[in-house]
């Protein structure tokens, strides 16, 4: 093994017996330089690397938020509840990570420019972002709508306010109304 590997010969072009070693024609065939092969396939474009650590950061932020939503049902200890229900602080981390990912995916690799194809049609860029999560928002809101509507009725909320909050939730406009930001956000 070492003899053929170190001399540049492989098992395919190594001489089979000692008679072939004495043959000069065989020597020239074995020692002839290999011709470079030219691939007809185009070289793939450089791709941006994926960062697994971002997924880890998202998990580290989402786990305490999930725990906080259900901590109220698991303990009545006020100190523990105060510690476990500070999830609103962690939501800022999602904004930071999402902002980084949006900026990273919108810039050129190894250049100080933006991806022109992403910003050629800004409205398309906007709708792609919205439609990446809106179907899931719509599905979850529809599944849990009976629970939210029942909670609203139990608290004596007028029908007009319930209709307005339903509209805000499905249209994703509740953030524009400070008093309605956390509607339909019960644990």
Image (cartoon, rainbow, N blue to C red):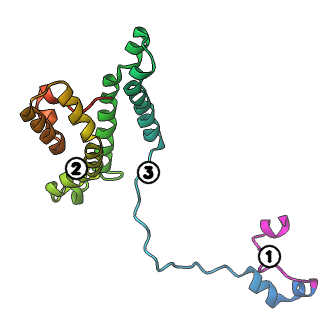
Q: Residue at x 12, y 42 (%)?
A: 167
Tell us which disc is closer to us: 1 or 3.
3
- Judge whether 64 appears above or below 115 on screen: above
- Judge whether 30 appears above or below 52 on screen: below
**Residue that badge 3 annotates:** 49
**Residue that badge 1 annotates:** 11
Q: Residue at x 32, y 22 (%)?
A: 89
Find the distance from the CA under tag 3 to the CA under tag 2: 24 Å
**Residue that badge 2 annotates:** 130
Q: Residue at x 15, y 59 (%)?
A: 121
Percent across and percent down for residue 8 are 75, 70
Q: Dividing the image into 4 quarters, which one contains the C terminus?
A: top left
For the question of whether residue 182 can be seen, the reply is no
Q: Earlier in the sequence, mark 2 or mark 1?
A: 1
Q: Earlier in the sequence, mark 1 or mark 3?
A: 1
Tell us which disc is closer to us: 3 or 2.
2
Find the distance from the CA under tag 1 to the CA under tag 3: 38 Å
Query: How packed is label 3: few (under 14 Cα within 10 Å), some, or many (20 or more)?
Result: few
Percent across and percent down for residue 155 are 18, 24
Percent across and percent down for residue 128 are 23, 55
* Total marks placed: 3
Q: Secondary structure at mark 1?
A: loop
Give, as a single range, the part of the protein colored magenta.
Answer: 1-18
Say left or right for 168 vs 54: left
Q: Dividing the image into 4 quarters, which one contains the N terminus?
A: bottom right
Percent across and percent down for residue 69 are 37, 27
Find the distance from the CA under tag 2 to the CA under tag 1: 58 Å
Query: How packed is label 1: few (under 14 Cα within 10 Å), some, or many (20 or more)?
Result: few
Query: Which secondary structure type mostly characterizes the magenta part of the structure?
Result: loop
């Amino acid at each position: 093994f070492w003899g053929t590997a170190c001399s540049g010969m492989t098992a395919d072009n190594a001489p089979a017996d000692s008679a072939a070693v004495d043959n000069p024609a065989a020597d020239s065939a074995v020692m002839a330089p290999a011709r470079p092969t030219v691939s007809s396939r185009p070289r793939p474009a450089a791709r941006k690397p994926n960062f697994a650590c971002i997924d880890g950061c998202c998990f580290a932020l989402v786990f305490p938020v999930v725990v906080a939503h259900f901590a109220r049902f698991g303990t009545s200890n006020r100190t523990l509840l105060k510690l476990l229900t500070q999830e609103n602080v962690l939501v800022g981390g999602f904004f930071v990570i999402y902002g980084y990912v949006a900026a990273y995916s919108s810039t050129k690799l190894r250049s100080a420019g933006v991806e022109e194809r992403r910003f050629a049609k800004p409205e398309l860029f906007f709708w792609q972002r919205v439609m990446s999560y809106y179907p899931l928002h719509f599905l979850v809101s529809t599944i849990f709508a009976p629970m939210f509507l029942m909670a609203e009725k139990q608290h004596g909320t007028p029908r007009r306010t319930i209709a307005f909050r339903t509209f805000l939730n499905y249209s994703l406009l509740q953030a524009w109304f400070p008093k309605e930001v956390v509607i339909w956000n019960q644990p």
